[in-house]
Amino acid sequence: MLPALVRKTWRDDRRALAGWAAGVAAFTVIYTSFYRRFQGAAEMKQDALPKGMLDFLGIADMLSAAGYLQATVFSLIGPLLLLMCAITLTARTIARPEEDGGMELLLVNPVSRRAFAGQRLAATGTAVTAVAAVPWVLLMVIVPAVGMQIPLSRVSAAAFGLVALVWCFTGIAFLVGAATGGRGMVLAVTGAIALATYLANAVSGMAGAWGWLRWLSPFHYFIGTDPLHTGWHPAELLVLVAAGAATTVAGVVLFDRRDIGV
Amino acid sequence: MTSDYAVLAEDLTKFYGPRRGIEGLTLGVEPGEVMGFLGPNGAGKTTTIRLLLDFLRPTRGRATVLGLDPRRDKATLHGRIGYLPGELAFPGRERAADLLRFLGDARGGVAWSRVTELAERLDLDLTRPVRAMSKGNKQKVGLVQAFMHQPALLVLDEPTSGLDPLMQQEFLAMVRDARAAGQTVFMSSHVLAEVQQVADRVAIVRDGRLAAVERVESLGRRAVRSVEIHFADPVDPGEFAGLPGVGDVTVSGPVLKCTVDGRLDPLIKAAARHEVVDLLSAEPDLEETFLSFYYHSEGAGDATRAGA
Ligand SMILES: Nc1ncnc2c1ncn2[C@@H]1O[C@H](COP(=O)(O)OP(=O)(O)OP(=O)(O)O)[C@@H](O)[C@H]1O
Ligand SMILES: [Mg+2]
């Protein structure tokens, strides 16, 4: 039997989770199912936008199946939706109850502080992972169905990258919440990091002198390896997983050390 | 001191940055005892309680609860404590029954009959969502969860706040039952009258410091009563002003008004020298005593001496 706290966390988040899962699913299905109809129009759009803009948006070519999938699901809106989901839900593990006062009755749970933080994150982490895996599951069906010529293992590599990216930012959001207990802090700091590293990755792709910036960006490790064309890159994905794990551990340790609800 | 105490604070101190929460608190609560923890707003009651539960970490000193260290033994300890937060807020949007089931499961399972029995006692409808409840009903949910697993120690921060008088009485009965069952109760309050009905001792904090610890019975002896005597003829205030325990003497014609701290005997003997028409004495108001002794600084020195 799962710990009561884990079940409680899921129960409290179930509506938000269902909403996010439905939103991400709708987004994935709508964009990819336009693939065939988009084929003609794509050429126009490709010409309409300047090359620099396309690079910045991470849309190399909209014409190939891989390019289309990258442009729609993996370049901007997909990660944006999933990170918003991950960050807002992770803000609920510690920061939100601490701010609205519900924390005391959660924390009198007879487990250690560390176990408490661990169980809270375990519950939210699995839920967020499930949402982040929605595009993966759907693409396994949709890609062959709409006739996109991409090997499924490459789609999996990119889709898993999305999950790993979400883990990385879930860890960061958890760390900020566990260390500060401020919900606004979680949203602001994690959001700023996401925006800054997204831009860093985009800029480094365009300007050679700034190329080194991409090594600092989780987005590089997720999509910079071009998984839809080149498949799995375990080392890069491992960086994301390790970043998520390290921030999680740091969060648990800091939560164990501080005053709660001051 | 040994840790035979249910709660033992030794030089317990908490500063919020430069702000004092509680300072130098040394206090022991015996097992099986009911201790009231009184003091005005901002005195440091909630701070102390949150230190005992390891939500806050002391700046100095330490606390031992049920012989355990609040931080190191949090897991064991929280299973044996029933805690009612002073600023009650509930996690989630569930019905009271679901919330209580979660809290019961988290504490290793609580017989549901125990929950319904407490809910009936407090006239609480468990099928309603907690968020939508009135303040008093929320307080009842808080009380049910604190009492439901029959913990060795109950730590209650302003347990009667929001309860109507009838429910306050029911709560006090619950405390008496807990005491009879050998549980220890440490409860904060602003109202001496309610604590006095159930507590063995009261500890009074003011301004972040312990002002006094006294047995409840001895509080009565320290009570100040106001007395009014109507004589047949006008009297001289000088005759009464110097008497032991007598203060605030005012005389208007044949009517003497004063306060008496302690025994009435000296005043009665002095009054007997005149023809007395009427004598009115209000019952000693503990609340007034409490206010005068502990809330105002002039009473403070006295209170500290009495507590030492
Ligand atoms: N989070 C906090 N940050 C800064 N100061 C605080 C904090 N919490 C309490 N204090 C200060 O500590 C002191 C003690 O507050 P505490 O809440 O313990 O009082 P209390 O006795 O519970 O009061 P009340 O009867 O109003 O509940 C007050 O001066 C208060 O301003
Ligand atoms: Mg308080």
Image (tube, coloured by chain):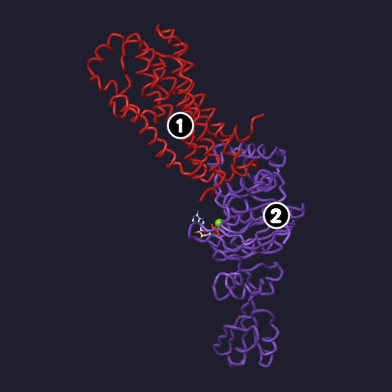
Q: Amino acid at mark 2?
A: Val
Q: Position of residue B38 (x, y in %)?
A: 61, 63
Q: Position of residue A233 (x, y in %)?
A: 46, 19
Considering the numbered disc 2 on the image, is that residue within a helix, a strand or a loop?
helix
Work out whether residue B130 can be spotted: yes
Residue B175: mark:
2
Residue A50, percent across and down? 23, 20
Q: Residue at x 52, y 58 (%)?
A: B15
Question: What chain does mark 1 sit on?
Answer: A
Q: CA distance from mark 2 to mark 1?
A: 48 Å
| Chain assignment, label 2 | B
Q: Amino acid at mark 1?
A: Phe
Q: Nearer the viewer, residue A39 or B214?
A: A39
User: How many residues crowd around disc 2 within 10 Å: few (fewer than 14), some, or many (20 or more)?
Assistant: many
Give the vertical position of B238 relative to B296 (above or below): below
Residue B234 visible in the shown view: no
* Quadrant of the image containing the C terminus of chain B: bottom right
Question: In this rendering, would A72 be left or right of A240?
Answer: left
> Quick one: which chain is purple?
B
Q: Is residue A122 above or below residue B301?
A: above
Q: Secondary structure at mark 1?
A: helix
Residue holding disc 1: A169
